[in-house]
Image (spheres, coloured by chain):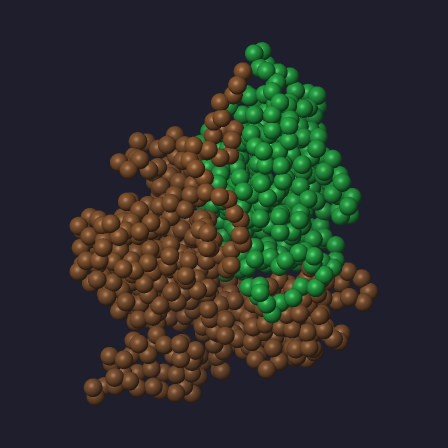
Chain colours: A green, B brown
Amino acid sequence: MTSSPQIIEHGRGRPPLDPHLKALENEAIHIFREVAAEFERPVMLYSIGKDSSVLLHLARKAFHPGKIPFPLLHVDTTWKFAEMIEFRDRIAQEYDLELHVHTNPRGRAENITPFTHGSARYTDIMKTEALRQALDAGKYDVAFGGARRDEEASRAKERIYSFRTPDHRWDPRNQRPELWNIYNGMIRPGESVRAFPLSNWTEVDIWRYIEAEEIPLVPLYYAAERAFVERDGMLMMAEDARFEPLPGETVQRDFIRFRTLGCWPLTGAIRSRASNLTEVIDELEIATVSERQGRAIDRDQSGSMEKKKREGYF
Amino acid sequence: MTAPSTPAVSLVNFEDDAPAPHHAGKDSRPLRFITCGSVDDGKSTLIGRLLWDTKAVKEDQAAALSRDSTGKQNDLGLPDFALLLDGLQAEREQGITIDVAYRYFSTDKRAFIVADTPGHVQYTRNMATGASTADLAVLLVDARAGLLEQTRRHATIAALMGIRQFVLAVNKIDLTGYDEPGYHKIARDFRELALTLGVNNVISIPVSALKGENIVLSGKATMPWYEGPTLVEVLERATQRGGQSTGFRLSVQRVSRPGEGFRGYQGTVSGGSIKPGDSVVVLPSGVEANVKQIVTFDLIRNAAVSGDAITLVLDRPVDIARGDMIVALDQRPQTGTAFSARLVALSPDAIEPGKRYWLKAGSRRQRVTVTPTQQLDLQSGKWQPATTLPLNAIGTANLDFDEAAIFDAYETNRQTGAFILIDPDTNNTVAGGMIQGRRKSSDGLAREGAEKVTVTLPAHLLAAFRASDFARDHAGEIRISADEDE
């Protein structure tokens, strides 16, 4: 006997979602539909990671049986893992998505890299500035993102509709109050909104939803024997041709996996034997460190995420 | 070279014998609650304690706290919880909490979303925001001080926003030497206060947030006289927000027409339930139809209930647009151009009489003229005549629409009875509103009041009667008065 015996979902080859995940899913679908109906030119930020994968799945659900009524945008820093790019292109084709890829031409021309320019400057140019360029070029008035409030302290006060000035700035002291599930999408020309359907999801929710809905993921989330070095307390994967070991560094091989995915020089792996979803969730439920721990950009200084957000970072 | 397994590169600290992992699904929706109290009551410590003892705070976050902390750690070796909670740099610098923050934690049984709101400046605005989605309110008092003026204010706002379950956390009980009679007096006072506000589901708990007693872990060792549940046990058992006693409601968000032959109405069920074959009526047009299919990504469903995001297919072509409501044929909401409502003013610009605003309710946005009539004096609990509503005021106003509006009373449905006001000059959200009912004429509720049934009761029964489900369900129809002869 299930917890809601009166509801039968024909054709679903899986057991129904538990009420907790169902509530989160319903809320996200509601937000997707509301944004798509209220704004002129929506776009969905797609970063290829697990949260983006859930976001994409929810978008497909929200507009079923129709197609997703907006394009996806990937800001490619050129330093993503090769497996991420392969996965992105496969998914775009399989789901028949309208995918735009943007790389900051200035960054490319000046050959900005995380190794030569430092993680802060690199992130500012290749991610934040690139995102602003792409949003301006597309004249998008709303961009969906997969950010969650449990990720980082400054996110805890983020609205579901996060208002941005014409130069994409976020003013944490001047946000619109958000009551019930009624969202205010009224903006002036040039202003925009970042919409976060996953605001109320936690990392465990994301993983349990991926399991329940059988959502495909980049294989880097699962443990495998990979080459890496230990640098500044971070396990840096050493499988990209651009990787160069520093003097004194030894390339090791062991079972590692990633808890979040970003640019490979800035994203630390963890030692793990969790090679499938069940094992990843088992590991997560007894985890004692947070997922952003592997992100170099968060550790630059205290409050660094808030600074980046004010400047237009997602 | 062998790398030591530090927390930096491994998820799990294997030093402890970890329990056998399991990831069974949660059997209920997340419980949303709001915490009310001031810094002095230990609110940050209480929330921090909930997160800490349910292991929602990870080691690296705790490490960042000790890096930020200015040596303010307490003697229990805990991090400075206020730092954990005050997420924004601006707040840290000023040492105040300026907005609503949402926190997440879970137990084996249930997941929780806490709306953490500041207890001082702009508390009405922030509390109203947090309370709008909350199932339950945790009110915090200092065991040494008992109920304060602000306890009454917080309880009043929570009740007004439709919260019908209160938990009183009598904090810092350790500082009273675990004084049992003192605790019971506070609990009794609070129950009386809650009853006057129409809330009869009240639980009091003696706690020490700092020492972690009766929050997540039991306080039996120091309070053998307390037989009741811990705070987390109460939260695990709490019911979800009620007040959805209307029939089927669906506010149409968008019309899906992916190709010839399919026309679906997408939205979230905000009351009642629906199944194929049910008769519905579309408002405001009044056209009737039957439900043919409930479509979701997981193919066809045989029913949908409140909260479900669905696509509805009807058995005949009907002209339906975004903002229309599809409702149960035999249980319709109120439609009209004149309503009265409670308002919470959220903006530094006051709600001005006769000003035209945008009103958004569900997926519908329409023009409305707002005329404030009363303001609640939070100190006395009395309603006073008013013509404007300044920031943080709670008031009553008349709403007059150009075109028909569709609402339920907030008392009966917290979704179809709620709305926001948007200032067309600034696009800001300037008020949250709760529908009381339709006005039958332009001169307000007075005439409608004449149609109410008057219930006269001995004074000592008034509070209990007001708190009853019957009185709440018929709030718009009865007038309650004290028997003067008693």
Q: Can you say which quadrant of the picture contains the C terminus of chain B?
A: bottom left
B40 to B261, vertically: above or below: above
**Residue sitting nearer the eye, B308 or A199:** B308
Residue at the image position 46 percent from the left and 71 percent from the top: B243
Residue at the image position 39 percent from the left and 67 percent from the top: B164
Q: Is residue B145 visible?
A: yes
Residue at the image position 70 percent from the left and 64 percent from the top: A10
- Rendering coords of residue B255 (x, y %): 70, 64
Q: Can you say which quadrant of the picture contains the N terminus of chain B?
A: top right
* Residue B184 sits in quarter: bottom left
A264 to B301, vertically: above or below: above
**Residue sitting nearer the eye, A104 or B76:** B76
**Residue sitting nearer the eye, B145 or A290:** A290
B282 left or right of B138? right
Residue at the image position 46 percent from the left and 37 percent from the top: A288
- Rendering coords of residue B419 (x, y %): 51, 65
B178 left or right of B10? left
* Residue B275 sits in quarter: bottom right
Q: Is residue B251 visible?
A: no
Residue furthest to the right:
B260
- Rendering coords of residue B143 (x, y %): 22, 54
- Rendering coords of residue A107 (x, y %): 67, 26
